[in-house]
Amino acid sequence: MHQHVLILRALCALALAPCEVRADDCERLPKPTVTLKRHQEAFALDLRTSFRTLTLLGPAGTRPGMKVLGLTRGTAIVSFQTRIVSYVDPGGRWECASPQLTVTYGFSPMTVYVAREFPQGSCAWNEIHRHELRHVRAYQEHLEGIEPELREALQRRFVTGDPWRGPVGQARNRIQQELEERWAPYVKRMINKVDLAQALIDTPEEYARVASSCAGEIRRLTR
């Protein structure tokens, strides 16, 4: 931003009248904005994978000897839609640019696995599926929970109150580069903090409860 201010002052020193016109035209632009959207996508249900494979796919912290009967996996995504409303001076040298950003974030794909050893509709399948739906809710609640912090950080950076000023095309290139190099990794790090919430669900007590449910059906099918 300081670089843009210095450029503006240099131009004004060369030609005061055009700068006065520019200020009037720049004020007509809308203010910069940031809009956040949560990605909405139904989860896929996978019933073809064995519990042995799920155990290999499961969290790194899975204790030795423990069998993973169901699993919920989501991949963090973020996308940016950038619309630049700008005013270019008649000479085509400089511009005022107002970025209008839409940030979409979430998980895609999200897959719920129930091991194929458990017939759909059985007591064991229902118990495992019910447990995995708790993970789905944890994913959804986490996305909602981080939204205020994401909005505050992005607005502090991009909602500057006034249009950005500088050479023609500089604002768009600068914003795209910054979104890719700084903000995409930041948003994904925030999304991936969901692992902390998921760990609170997969307690030893919960594993023991599910394993011993349905009159021993789960233990029999996983011998």
Image (cartoon, rainbow, N blue to C red):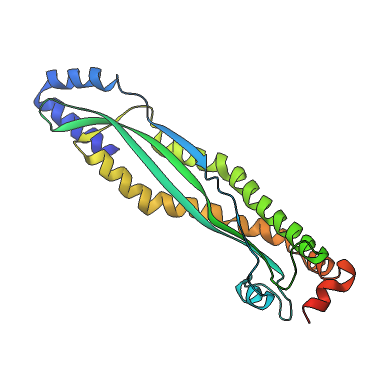
Q: Give how far across and how far down residue 113 sits, in percent.
A: 65, 64
Residue 74, horizontal then vertical, whole percent: 57, 58
In the displayed structure, does residue 133 sit left or right of residue 28?
right
Report the residue that reaches farthest toward the right: 215
Where residue 47 sits: x, y (%)? 65, 66
In the displayed structure, 55 sits above or below 174; it is below
- Figure quadrant of residue 126: bottom right
Check the image and report above or below for 58 versus 161.
Answer: below
Q: In percent of the image, x 84 and y 66: which residue is there?
A: 209
Residue at 30% of width from left, 34% of height from top? 84
Foreground of the two, 72 or 180: 72
Q: Is residue 21 above or below residue 47?
A: above
Toward the viewer: 93 or 139?
Answer: 139
Which quadrant is the C terminus positioned in?
bottom right
Query: Which residue is rendered at x = 10% and y = 23% of the image?
Result: 15
Q: Position of residue 109 (x, y in %)?
A: 53, 57
Q: Which residue is drawn at 18% across and 36% down?
A: 168
The image quadrant where one finds the N terminus is: top left
> In the visual, does 182 lie left or right of 164?
right
Give the side of residue 48 with respect to residue 22, left or right.
right
The answer to whether residue 179 is above or below residue 90 is: below
